[in-house]
Image (cartoon, rainbow, N blue to C red):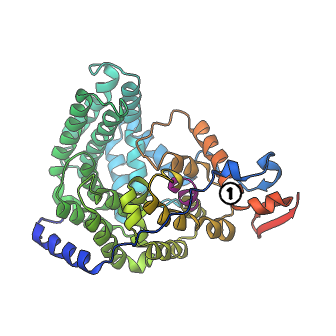
Amino acid sequence: MLTQSRQARDLLSRISGLVSSRSRPAARQAPSPAQTPAEQLPPGRLEDCLSIPVCSAQGDPQSIAAQERGQFLARQELWEDLSSRIREADESRAAAPCGLPLADLIAYGARADVVTATERAVADNESPRSRALIRGLMAFEALRAENRSDPYLTALVALAHTDIGWAWRSAGGQARPQSNQRRCAAHFDRAAALLDQIAADSRSSPFLQAAQCALFAGRTGSTVQVADAYSALIDLAPANHRHMRALGTRMLPRASGSYAALELEARRTAARTEQTWGAGGYTWVYFDAITIDDQACARVDTRFFLDGLRDIVKANPSQEMINLLAAYCTVALRKGRGEDQQADVPRLRIAEAANWLIRDHLTELHPLIWAHAEEGFDNSALVRSVSRFAARGHAGAMQAIAAVFREEIASGQKVAFTEQGLQLSPA
């Protein structure tokens, strides 16, 4: 992690320059909110007029294999082998086709049993003294005590505490009791204490640095501290867009930043990752931020964002990426539409990109990606049935895709996605 040698005045001077040089978006009359896809389509079964190959409802096979490997090694208590696998994947920057680092996937699988059991116990309102809530973590803490010099196993235990902290934060909905908030804070404090012991190891490791940055979701940090930590992480792994997306949400005023800081970090990230993403770094930093904050959406440089969207497709035209971007434009951006006119102008302009994404680049459907878009890409959402979750994503995707072709479908044509490209024929 970078040290805090850059003081607050450094950031303030940069932000001042940005604010003085940046023109505010003029107030414009927003278009009326679009109808939902279901309202735009003629009656009838979508399967009769729309055909598209569907990827496995369980997700990317390489991602599943990495998670299962981590889970197996943890269940067998093969900790040395587990640490070695995570380290090798981390140092080689190995990633699954979906873009997720294999180190993260292995580590997620290794702590899945502990975290899932705790999440379910919390969701079912188990007593805080329930064995289901403490047994797994006690075993993990014992593991760390026996391997104090291993930074990867230390980080694994810290990440389990972070995940469980999220579970306590999410429990109870909007009316979270104070006791839940205290338990959430206690888990983040424990994770911070563990990660503080491996801070030096984190400077050259994307996996360890990402664990350090995950703490900011539950602990307050200054704008400079958060921006510097994420900048260091992005420099270590510029191909991983999730770090840039996380930076954007942490730069919101509701977290550790401001709208000026968000814009500044988006432009800085675009400049630093230009060789990897073109203008896409700007898009990634704003990606989640504008779905959860109307003011951020109203202020985004729409032209820059759309240029970045096209550059992302050039850099990574995989179907995982196309599904992610298409689901984002048609599903995630739809939430909140009509509540803020200034935010609706850029929101609707960006949503129009779904037309060329789907028509020109989509060849297969990835249901889980669309299901996660329905949840606002909320990683803390508890999924009790992957098959039902995927089925919901599949249904939503079919509606969204059919809406793009509503004129063709209304005129009696059948839309088929094939390996040779998009084909239209009489239904």
Residue at horizontal 28 percent and vertical 48 percent from the top: 217
Left or right of 80, for residue 76: right
Q: Is residue 148 above or below residue 332?
A: above
Front-lying residue, 148 or 310: 310
Q: Within the magenta stretch, is there residue 7? A: no
Left or right of 281, for residue 52: right
Query: Quadrant of the image for the N terminus?
Result: bottom left
Picture coordinates of residue 300, whole percent (x, y):
40, 68
Picture coordinates of residue 153, whole percent (x, y):
27, 46
- State the residue position of label 1: 401
Residue at horizontal 23 percent and vertical 27 percent from the top: 179
Residue at horizontal 42 percent and vertical 66 percent from the top: 284
Front-lying residue, 103 or 381: 381
Most extreme residue toward the right is 426
Left or right of 12, for residue 291: right
* Corner quadrant of residue 400: bottom right
